[in-house]
Amino acid sequence: MSSSSNCKSCCEWKCWAFLKSSVGKKLVMGVTGLLLSGFVFTHMAGNMLIIFKGPDAYNLYGHGITSNPLYPLISYGLLAIFIVHVLTAISLIIDNKKARPISYAAGATKGDKRVSLASRTMAYSGSLLAAFLVSHLITFKYGAYYTTTIDGREVRDLAKLLYEVFQNPGYVAWYVVSLLLLASHLKHGFAAAFQSVGFWHPRYTPFIKSGAVLYALVVSFGFISQPLYVFLKH
């Protein structure tokens, strides 16, 4: 075997060993968490179209996404990121329980004597959010398929489905509670993600924590405004 092959194998082994380490897993959690956070914010912003621009703009937005040739690649990419994020979180929880009865999330409070409720319940909120995601996909992505014509184009009428679903007070309540859990999850997770990728210093840590709170509030209440708007106005 050549020296170059030996070097390549050695680098691959070191990379794999790093990813299996606690630091490597937290880095993976941080990177995947930030990528998912970016998607969540974009998705929330798109939902605002139903409120500020009306059903046609909302339907055209949905059609533009699903008709994009890159849509399957992006969808599977997001799914892969989500699965990696969840599996890494489970692995960290198992590792930490073996080592000590302190959750991974507590690591983000290094230097603090108090651990927030959000950090202590990250595993639970994450599990409930995963259940919500499955419910959300079943209801909307794979739900009833209506069509409408806009500017001569036939597109899926997601707005009609939205109006139907959010007339159910039970589903609206489930949606609102899930998004409040998302706020808690994002508040801690967004800040912890920056720590995991190395952005953690006494000088700018307070700004990261404040930004995480603001981000969590904007995203969660942005999402919540949609079902409340539909339920109260239609």
Image (cartoon, rainbow, N blue to C red):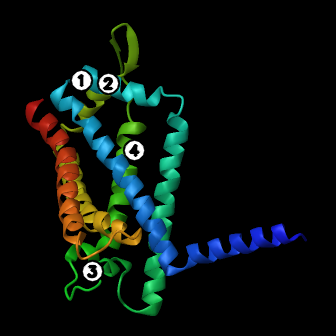
Of mark 3 and mark 1, the one earlier in the sequence is 1
Alpha carbon separation for disc pair 1 and 4 = 20 Å
Query: 86 or 218, which is in the foreground?
Result: 218
Compared with 225, 102 (above or below) is below
Compared with 170, 33 (above or below) is below
Q: Name the residue under label 3.
A: 109
Query: 199 or 148, which is in the foreground?
Result: 199
Amino acid type, callout 1? Pro
Give the label on residue 137, or none: 4
Number of marks in picture? 4
Q: Position of residue 221 (x, y in %)?
A: 16, 49
Give the label on residue 121, or none: none
Which residue is at 29% across, 74% downward?
201
Q: Mark 2 points at which residue?
A: 59
Q: Position of residue 24 (x, y in %)?
A: 51, 74
Give the label on residue 55, or none: 1
Alpha carbon separation for disc pair 3 and 1 = 43 Å
Q: Is mark 1 in CB contact (under 8 Å) with mark 2?
A: yes
Which residue is at 44% across, 67% downward?
29
Alpha carbon separation for disc pair 4 and 2 = 17 Å
